[in-house]
């Protein structure tokens, strides 16, 4: 896991981001979390060392990490969650289980495979996510 943390720090530095103690701690949370991370978890972790840290600081840093492509943001009914991007250079879309929060990457891009916006529309970026129940969770609840 230390490798993930070091890689994340190096990636931030390569993007010209000044490394603060709080940013290093945020990187640590993502490198040791196998799944989604809630902003309040990050805030709680940082607050142990920096009692005056604000949610605004956490959110600003999360936005920055999303903007540079190191983490991804997902919107669930119960709130926003973030996840370390598997490969910052790879463009992925996902199927997401709303029960266990497991993600299943789609290995194709809908924009590149048929979904065409109107010619007058300039695409600046896109995300494609499908929310549902995975097979394991459906089997446990008896739904299909």
Image (spheres, helix red, strand yellow):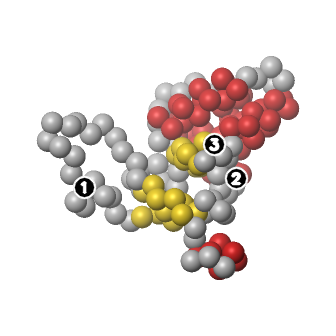
- Circle nearer the N terminus (3, 1): 3
- Secondary structure beneath dot 3 equals strand
Q: In this view, does 132 lie above or below 23?
A: below
Q: Quickly name the residue at label 3.
A: 79
- Drawn side of residue 143 relative to residue 70, left or right: right
- Drawn side of residue 69 relative to residue 55, left or right: left
Give the position of the N terminus as an image quadrant: bottom right
Q: Quickly name the residue at label 1.
A: 115
Q: Quickly name the residue at label 2.
A: 33
CA gap, disc 2 and disc 3: 18 Å
Q: Residue at x 57, y 77 (%)?
A: 144
Residue farthest toward the left in the current orientation of the protein = 119
- Circle nearer the N terminus (2, 1): 2
Categorize mark 3 by other alpha carbons within 10 Å: few (<14), some (14-19), many (20+). few
The location of residue 74, given as percent across then percent down, is 54, 47
Viewer-nearest of labels 2 and 1?
1
Q: Locate residue 125: give its quadrant.
A: top left
């Amino acid at each position: 896991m230390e490798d993930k943390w070091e890689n994340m720090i190096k990636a931030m530095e390569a993007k010209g981001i000044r490394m603060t103690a709080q940013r290093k701690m945020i990187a640590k949370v993502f490198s040791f979390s196998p799944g989604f991370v809630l902003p309040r978890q990050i805030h709680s972790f940082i607050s142990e060392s920096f009692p005056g840290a604000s949610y605004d600081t956490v959110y600003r840093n999360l936005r920055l990490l999303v903007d540079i492509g190191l983490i991804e943001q997902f919107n669930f009914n119960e709130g926003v969650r973030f996840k370390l991007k598997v490969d910052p250079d790879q463009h992925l879309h996902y199927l997401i289980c709303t029960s266990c929060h497991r993600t299943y990457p789609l290995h194709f891009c809908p924009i590149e495979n048929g979904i065409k916006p109107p010619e007058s529309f300039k695409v600046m970026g896109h995300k494609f996510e499908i929310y549902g129940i995975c097979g394991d969770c459906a089997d446990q609840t008896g739904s299909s």
